[in-house]
Image: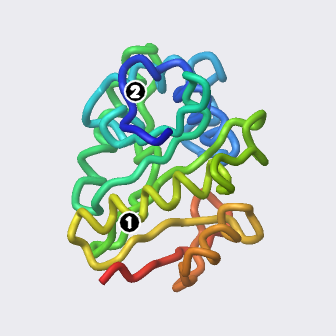
Amino acid sequence: MLRDATIVDADAVTMLVLHEVERRQLRRLRRVTKEQLSQMLFVGYHQPDFRYGYPQARVYQNQGVAVGVAYGYPAATERALDNQWATLFERQQLTVPQQLVVTPRALPDEWYLDLLTVRNRSKGKTYQQKWFDEWLLGDAIHRARQSGLPVMGMDVRPGSSLAGLAAEFGFVATQRRQLDRQTYYHLRLKLV
């Protein structure tokens, strides 16, 4: 079942986001331990104006547990969502990075899908002949259309399963980017 994330999903969603953020190897978070990062993400999840806060999330629930999450928002709100990182570093008594933890990625005319991930134990499982990540991506496209913006965008690693899924939905690579010294493709889907 797809639904908006709630405060109750904090533990499950924080773990999903933690694994994805670790996989992305963000340079500004290298000096942060896994426990500190987990705590920052957990506290941030409860903040409405945080990139990975619950208001930006949709979850796929299976047997009462959030097994997948998708984070997306209009490009115009991206900078405001990133302002919470400094507060989270201060709460952990860590030195606040001089530069943004996550560089802005959305183009001005986009509804941007920042993160889509499914728990490892739930990958390869389906409901009504659709994979859980298919449900999440389809829902994200629906939310993007409701925003009124003409394009939906996302960044993916070349050859990733999300890149393949996005191609099936009609996303097209428009540029190659270096984000935190890693190669990504910026994909776009026209919504109107």
The reply, left or right, for residue 38 in relation to residue 119 is: left
Q: Is residue 127 left or right of residue 45?
A: right
* Residue at 42% in and 17% down: 8
Q: Residues within 10 Å of mark 2 (few under 14, many from 20)?
A: many
Q: Residue at x 60, y 70 (%)?
A: 166
The circle on residue 45 is: 2
Q: Nearer the viewer, residue 171 or 20?
A: 171
Left or right of 174 on screen, residue 24: right
Question: What is the distance, in whole Å, between disc 2 and disc 1 at their CAs?
Answer: 21 Å
Label 1 element class: loop
Closer to the camera: disc 2 or disc 1? 2
Give SS at disc 2.
helix
- Residue under label 1: 106
Residue 104: x and y, percent? 39, 59
In the image, 125: left or right of 175?
right
Q: Nearer the viewer, residue 176 or 156?
A: 156
User: Crowdedness of circle 1 by 10 Å Cα count: few (<14), some, many (20+)?
Assistant: many
Q: Quadrant of residue 44?
A: top left
Q: What residue sits 57% from the left and 24% below the top?
A: 65
Q: Earlier in the sequence, mark 2 or mark 1?
A: 2
Residue at 52% x, 59% y is: 137
Q: How is the image coloured?
A: rainbow
